[in-house]
Image (cartoon, helix red, strand yellow):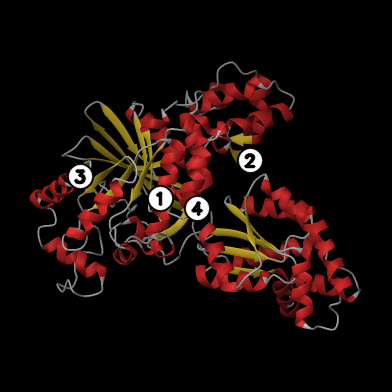
């Protein structure tokens, strides 16, 4: 059984029609769940008893568990600590935080998109945790629903500025935007929703295209905030390690594309670090940036987090944490210092605001969310990758390199089949007996070996699987395993090259069994078996197509930039 809150309106429509009910029943169900916030199926108005029974047999409605609510004594701000189901065997449950802020008649909810985060921002408490898991659609929208239930108030604004980097949980974040802005849901105007990102190449352009599409028209006016914090690539890479793969020149191009595609103004978030990002050159570069497209700059005071209480006073050193510590000891929080910096920007024509520190007394201000009882992780982002490619494009080599670069578990099915046989596991012995009889290992055994390998070896960083699946039946069985293990962000990497190029490459290797006729037959078999599998995955996974012709390193860089 599945949590029905994870189903979009379209998915509910498919379910009700496949089960013999009228199409309009899906709308009734969706409205009951997302507008009326029903917690039982019999609370959904207007649906017949036999549909209620069908829903109860196939779904459940899961609430987030509210662990604690802290009320600020200084501000009308509350911090919510929620508990959700863990996706990996190591994590039975994980905790996330959200913030309720009420000011001048406006109610803003700051919600999380991930438990933990792998961007690694040195000034952010969440970034010190590492990524624990991506939140599902229900995990994101249920934060809003639970806060409404507790406070009795509907938000006027929502910001995706809680725990996590939203664009690293892209699909679920986009689906949550569609649900929250739906006229059959809370109907939050998209112009009152802001998504904050550190800036990921390829993702900002994709986001602009997606929210501008007819299919997602309710999300069209979603605002974008870039966590800038420095206009110097070197300093920014020390503040935000993931930006080493996302240079500012490329980010600026994508921000411009976002504005031209959506017409939505962009905000630049800028935490003030005295002596680090407040030089005259910084002011000049911010001024130039602000003139590229309509935008404004939000100056954010730095809020203290665990791990930066002690440091080296030598600001000339290379350790950025030491420099932040030096800033902290030298009037970082002085209103004068921040106001003066803002005035310098305004003199250059930059539209500049100074953000207030709502909830700083309960660690609910910008950068302080950490679900404090969660242990820090040493992993990077969760990636769930399958790689396909014809013979001759270096698929296995790419898989090994991606796994090494991103700290992923590399599952080569051929290797793990041999391992199971050599170790004499139950499945390995069965496979050995079948192979000795001259037969191919059947699907159920191969699937079992893959499942065991994932359960025993996959880390929070994720995995890359190559050499499998090879049939539609295997792909469907593998999807069930992924679903059971909570892997809901599968990406398919396909390496392509034209047939003549493949023939040229393989003949160049000089192997005696590589004749042109044999190579072309292998290509035909690959196309006939793999293309239907890729088409199958297009319905429920993101497919990344890469030109497999070129240097291994160049291809690898392109793959990683698109993940």
User: Which mark is drawn over residue 95?
Assistant: 1
Discs 4/2, front: 4
Q: Secondary structure at mark 4?
A: loop
- Dot 2 and dot 3 residues touching (CB under 8 Å): no
**Residue 248 image point, x, y percent:** 37, 58
- Which residue is more in the foreground, 407 or 167? 167
Vertically, is 71 above or below 327? above
Q: Residue at x 18, y 65 (%)?
A: 325
> What residue would you read off at disc 2?
1
> What residue would you read off at disc 3?
357
The earlier-in-sequence mark between 3 and 1 is 1
- Dot 1 and dot 4 residues touching (CB under 8 Å): no
The earlier-in-sequence mark between 4 and 2 is 2
Measured Cα–Cα span from mark 3 to mark 1 = 23 Å
Q: Residue at x 49, y 29 (%)?
A: 218
**Residue 158 image point, x, y percent:** 36, 35
**Residue 508 image point, x, y percent:** 76, 80
> What residue would you read off at disc 4?
202
What crowding class fits label 2: few (fewer than 14 Cα within 10 Å), some (14-19), or many (20 or more)? Answer: few
What crowding class fits label 3: few (fewer than 14 Cα within 10 Å), some (14-19), or many (20 or more)? Answer: some
**Residue 482 image point, x, y percent:** 64, 54
Measured Cα–Cα span from mark 4 to mark 2 = 35 Å
Which quadrant of the view contains residue 409?
bottom right
Vertically, is 243 above or below 480? below
């Amino acid at each position: 059984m599945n949590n029905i809150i994870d189903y979009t309106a379209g998915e509910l429509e498919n379910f009700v029609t496949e089960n013999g009910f009228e199409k309009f029943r899906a709308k009734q169900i969706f409205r009951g769940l997302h507008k009326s916030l029903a917690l039982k199926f019999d609370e959904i108005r207007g649906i017949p008893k036999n549909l209620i029974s069908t829903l109860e047999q196939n779904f459940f409605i899961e609430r987030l568990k509210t662990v604690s609510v802290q009320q600020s004594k200084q501000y009308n701000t509350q911090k919510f600590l929620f508990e959700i189901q863990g996706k990996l065997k190591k994590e039975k449950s994980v905790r996330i935080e959200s913030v309720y802020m009420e000011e001048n008649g406006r109610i803003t909810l700051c919600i999380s998109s991930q438990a933990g985060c792998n961007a690694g921002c040195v000034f952010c408490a969440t970034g010190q945790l590492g990524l624990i898991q991506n939140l599902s659609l229900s995990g994101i929208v249920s934060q809003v629903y639970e806060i409404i239930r507790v406070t009795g108030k509907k938000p006027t604004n929502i910001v995706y500025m809680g725990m996590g980097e939203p664009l690293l949980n892209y699909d679920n974040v986009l689906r949550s935007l569609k649900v929250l802005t739906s006229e059959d849901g809370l109907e939050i105007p998209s112009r009152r929703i802001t998504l904050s990102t550190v800036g990921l190449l390829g993702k900002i352009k994709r986001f602009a295209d997606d929210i501008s599409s007819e299919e997602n028209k309710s999300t069209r006016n979603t605002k974008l905030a870039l966590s800038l914090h420095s206009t110097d690539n070197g300093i920014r890479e020390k503040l935000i390690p993931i930006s080493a793969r996302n240079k500012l020149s490329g980010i600026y191009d994508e921000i411009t594309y976002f504005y031209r595609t959506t017409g939505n103004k962009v905000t630049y978030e800028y935490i003030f670090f005295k002596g680090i990002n407040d030089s005259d050159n910084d002011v000049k570069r911010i001024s130039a940036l602000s003139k590229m497209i309509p935008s404004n700059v939000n100056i954010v005071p730095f809020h203290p987090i665990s791990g930066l209480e002690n440091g080296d006073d030598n600001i000339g050193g290379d350790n950025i944490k030491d420099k932040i510590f030096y800033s902290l000891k030298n009037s970082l929080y002085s209103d004068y210092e921040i106001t003066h910096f803002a005035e310098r920007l305004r003199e250059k024509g930059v539209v500049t605001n100074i953000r207030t520190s709502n909830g700083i007394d309960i660690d609910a201000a910008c950068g302080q969310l950490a679900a404090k009882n969660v242990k820090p992780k040493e992993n990077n982002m969760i990636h769930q990758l399958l790689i396909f490619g014809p013979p001759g494009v270096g698929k296995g080599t790419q898989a090994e390199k991606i796994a090494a670069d991103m700290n992923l578990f590399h599952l080569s099915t051929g290797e793990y089949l041999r391992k199971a046989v050599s170790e004499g596991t139950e499945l390995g012995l069965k496979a050995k007996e079948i192979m000795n009889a001259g037969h191919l290992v059947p699907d159920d055994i191969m699937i079992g070996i893959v499942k065991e390998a994932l359960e025993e070896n996959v880390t929070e960083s994720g995995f890359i699987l190559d050499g499998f699946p090879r049939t539609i039946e295997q792909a469907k069985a593998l999807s069930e395993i992924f679903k059971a293990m909570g892997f809901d962000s599968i990406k398919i990497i396909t390496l392509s090259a034209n047939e003549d190029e493949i023939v040229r490459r393989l003949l160049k290797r000089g192997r005696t069994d590589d004749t042109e006729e044999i190579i072309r037959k292998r290509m035909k078999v690959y196309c006939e078996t793999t293309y239907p599998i890729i088409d199958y995955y297009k319905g429920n996974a993101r497919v990344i197509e890469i030109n497999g012709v070129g240097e291994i390193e160049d291809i690898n860089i392109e793959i990683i930039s698109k993940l």
